[in-house]
Image (cartoon, rainbow, N blue to C red):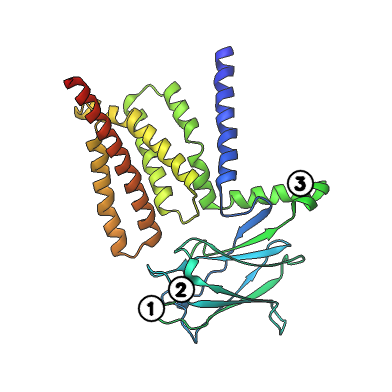
Amino acid sequence: MMRLFKEIAIIVLLFLLGTLLSLWWYKEVYITAIQEQQSETIPASFTKEPLVKGKTLYFAITAKHNNLGVLKLRPKTYNRINYDTIYFRLREKGKDTWEINNSYVVDRFEDKLFYPFGFPIIPNSKGRIYEIEITSEKGTPTDSVGFYGGYNSIATQYIYSRETIAINNKLLTSFLYEKLSSLMNDLYFILFYVIFLIPIILYVLTKYIKNDFLFYFIEIVIFLYMLFVYIFIPMAMDSSVIIYILTIGFFIFVSHLFHFFEKYFSIYRFSPSWLYGLSAMLVVYLLINIGFNKVLESTRIALAIFYTTLLALALSFFELVVKQKKRT
């Protein structure tokens, strides 16, 4: 009974820790904000070519809550740093004057990652339709950005102050419910969140899965899943998340996966050459992504190559030192 209680306690602890880390490291939305994915999307005519001078990007969105304060779009940089300036304007539908007029230099736009167009909070925005207009100051085909369309291409944030939430229990309850609901409806967050539940999966695998082949198969799936989320999901990830993913991935790769190859393919020794081989495969994949102008994917693959090669070099140096000591 005590053993079962201990195992349940470990699983609960890992679940709570994973949940806290996922919320803390999720950089797409402020702690005191609700982010919603809009059903509207960028018009197809503006997703194929850059926004140059003389063209106007226009679309409308319906606010889902009060306190609208941020509109987020996914820029397309065309694999270059651009220095154009764009003008962002917003107004409620039916009004003649633009309520928001902001300008942005686009040199800090990151390809495919949400860029937040912030403005003063609109208190009673729920259910209202807002028109957005974006124009270029001097954009040319070789110095301007575009915008991605399709799924998850437009998001809105509704911002609340901590003080207001803290003193109003009814508002706090409503805010927590709406925030949880918005996170559960965000496919990218769910894919991100699952990464932080992997320690639970590994713990359960170690304790309860006795079939070796099934055990290793699940670990291979987990390893590939982490690579997929890291490389392909267009969301902001700081160094802490990247280190976490690489640590879990390396643990799986070194502690378990090479035992699979040892048992089923008669490879008896883990060596740096494995990591060099993985780096070489990633280099090929990097070149393919560069060829298709996949900027975000290329950047993340390049970082994975750097860490993998660095680890391989460290292991090579360690082996060299061990061999040198044996000779002496």
Classify residue 191 as left or right of residue 173. Answer: left
Which residue ends up furthest to the top in the rendered image? 1
Q: Is residue 257 visible?
A: yes
Q: On the rendered structure, is 71 left or right of 187?
A: right
In this rendering, is residue 80 above or below 227? below
Q: Residue at x 36, y 43 (%)?
A: 224
- Residue carrying label 2: 146
Q: Amino acid at mark 1?
A: Thr
Compared with 178, 260 (above or below) is above
What percent of the width, then of the height, locates residue 60? 61, 74
**Screen quadrant of the N terminus:** top right
Of labels 1 and 2, the one closer to you: 1
Question: Dots 3 and 1: beta carbons under 8 Å?
Answer: no
Q: Residue 54, image x and y in percent? A: 50, 87
Q: Residue furthest bottom?
A: 54
Q: Is 196 on the left or on the right of 183, as rendered?
A: left
Q: Is residue 1 visible?
A: no
Pick whichever of labels 3 and 2 is earlier in the sequence: 2
Q: What's the mark number on residue 142?
A: 1
Closer to the observer: label 3 or label 2?
Answer: 2
Along the polypeptide, which appears first: circle 3 or circle 1?
A: 1
Dot label at residue 208: none
Q: Secondary structure at mark 2?
A: strand
Which residue is at the front of the view, 82 or 292? 82
Say whether marks 1 and 2 touch (CB < 8 Å).
no
Q: Nearer the viewer, mark 3 or mark 1?
A: 1
For the C terminus, give its image quadrant. top left
State the image coordinates of residue 175 (x, y, percent, origin top left): 73, 51
Disc 1 crowd, CA 10 A, few/some/many (<14, 14-19, 20+): few
Residue shown at 38% from the left, 78% from the top: 142
For label 3, the residue is 173
Amino acid type at image mark 3: Thr
